[in-house]
Image: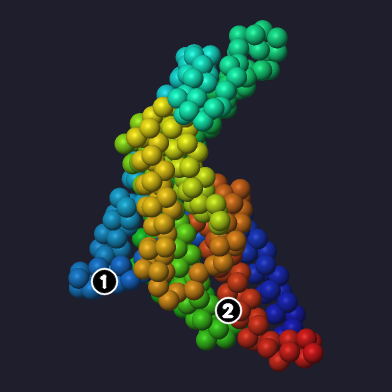
């Protein structure tokens, strides 16, 4: 009786302390989770660097954190700054552009004339006069939306810098002491050690395959699209490159939803070689590079189904923001791995119930 009372009291204290600990760490949970994912994804890098430094784990961990900072964070900041600049330019162009002249130019397109299409000319001045919520008003709303997005982006910079600091501060100790932390968790967990090791193995394997097979390829396609649009003179190439990354994560859609309309519009505007270049390069390189890179990046590792990648990515963005592109799929990987353990552990019971 006394033993049961002591155990109950201890469990109550653990639960209360756990709730308090959760509230303390709540602002940093996303950063800690992201740091753990990175520590597992780049564990082999750490081991190689540690060997070269003769087992000096602190120096090896610090070196790898610096390397990852330049690989992951610096390009992100450069891209964000380019997007901000292009968004500012786009906002200013929307305010200054003579849309009546643009529509007139489009209606006089030689491509449309050659195929016998008579595109009607729209008088924006009359529309604006008759209806304040007409096309001109909508264009103004687009400009205001871009401005609001820019404002929120600048407001979030300080928060992003703080989270980045927490991620790399945690990553330093996870590289150095990660194995000891995992052993401690395994020792406290009621699951079998073999199941926990298998869970971690599946988690790392599927995470690597999913990230390399979707996110990395999407980033490569976005980079190619940015270079293509920059070469052909399409406005705001970096913004379109980022949009390509997002669409590349969508199964059965991909980058074609960006380069195909862009190429057609360039042709209709009379920019023949630019439009043909976009269509040919987009079809032969951007949209097909996935077929060549995926087998090499993923190999024999098991990845998530494309529909799960798509839904988990969108859900992750909605829940965690931009970092959800990484966290969303990884959380689903963890959930599926736990279901696999459940299926193995209760195999006999499930078979009896399913008879």
Q: Which mark is residue 48?
A: 1
Q: Which mark is residue 189?
A: 2
Q: Nearer the viewer, residue 92 or 279?
A: 279
Q: Are marks 1 and 2 in contact (CB under 8 Å)?
A: no
Point 49% across, 47% down: residue: 256
Q: Nearer the viewer, residue 214 or 316?
A: 214
The spot of residue 351 in percent (x, y) is: 73, 89
Q: Nearer the viewer, residue 179 or 133?
A: 133
Position of 317 relative to 139 (above/below): below
Q: Residue 145 falls in which quadrant of the image? A: top right
Quarter that holds the N terminus: bottom right
Quarter that holds the C terminus: bottom right
Position of 144 relative to 336 (above/below): above
Label 1 vs 2, first from the N-terminus: 1
Figure label count? 2
Instruction: Identify the secondary structure beneath mark 2.
Output: loop
Instruction: Identify the secondary structure beneath mark 1.
Output: helix
Position of 197 relative to 26 (above/below): below
- In this rendering, would 219 be left or right of 139? left
Q: Nearer the viewer, residue 282 or 145?
A: 282
The spot of residue 189 in percent (x, y) is: 58, 79
Point 71% across, 92% down: residue: 348
The spot of residue 187 in percent (x, y) is: 52, 81
- In this rendering, would 35 be left or right of 172? right
Judged by depth in the image, the label closer to the viewer, 1 or 2, is 1
- For the residue carrying disc 2, how many other residues have a C-alpha within 10 Å: few (<14), some (14-19), or many (20+)? few
Please say whether residue 145 is visible from this viewpoint: yes
Please say whether residue 136 is visible from this viewpoint: no
Give the colouring mode of the picture: rainbow
Label 1 – label 2 distance at C-alpha: 30 Å
Point 38% across, 66% down: residue: 297
The spot of residue 300 in percent (x, y) is: 43, 76
């Amino acid at each position: 009786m006394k033993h049961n009372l002591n155990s109950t009291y201890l469990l109550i204290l653990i639960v209360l302390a756990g709730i308090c600990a959760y509230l303390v760490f709540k602002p940093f949970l996303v950063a800690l989770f992201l740091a753990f994912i990175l520590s597992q994804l780049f564990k082999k890098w750490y081991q190689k660097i540690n060997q070269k430094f003769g087992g000096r784990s602190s120096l090896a961990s610090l070196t790898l954190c610096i390397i990852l900072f330049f690989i992951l964070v610096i390009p992100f900041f450069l891209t964000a700054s380019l997007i901000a600049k292009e968004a500012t330019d786009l906002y200013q162009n929307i305010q200054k552009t003579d849309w009546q002249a643009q529509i007139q130019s489009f209606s006089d397109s030689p491509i449309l004339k050659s195929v016998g299409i008579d595109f009607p000319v729209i008088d924006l001045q009359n529309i604006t006069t008759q209806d304040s919520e007409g096309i001109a008003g909508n264009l103004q709303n687009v400009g205001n939306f871009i401005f609001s997005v820019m404002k929120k982006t600048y407001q979030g910079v300080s928060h992003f810098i703080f989270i980045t600091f927490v991620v790399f501060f945690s990553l330093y100790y996870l590289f150095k002491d990660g194995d000891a932390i995992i052993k401690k968790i395994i020792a406290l967990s009621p699951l079998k050690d073999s199941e926990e090791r298998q869970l971690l193995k599946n988690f790392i394997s599927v995470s690597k395959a999913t990230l390399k097979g979707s996110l990395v390829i999407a980033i490569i396609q976005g980079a190619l699209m940015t270079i293509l649009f920059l070469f052909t003179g399409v406005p705001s190439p970096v913004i379109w490159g980022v949009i390509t990354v997002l669409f590349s994560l969508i199964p059965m859609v991909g980058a074609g939803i960006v380069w195909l309309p862009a190429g057609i519009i360039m042709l209709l505007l009379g920019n023949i070689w630019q439009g043909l270049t976009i269509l040919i390069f987009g079809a032969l390189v951007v949209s097909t590079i996935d077929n060549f890179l995926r087998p090499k990046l993923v190999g024999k590792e098991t990845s998530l189904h494309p529909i799960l990648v798509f839904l988990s990515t969108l859900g992750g963005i909605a829940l965690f923001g931009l970092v959800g592109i990484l966290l969303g799929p990884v959380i689903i990987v963890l959930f599926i791995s736990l279901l696999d353990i459940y299926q193995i552990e209760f195999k006999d019971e499930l078979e009896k119930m399913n008879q």
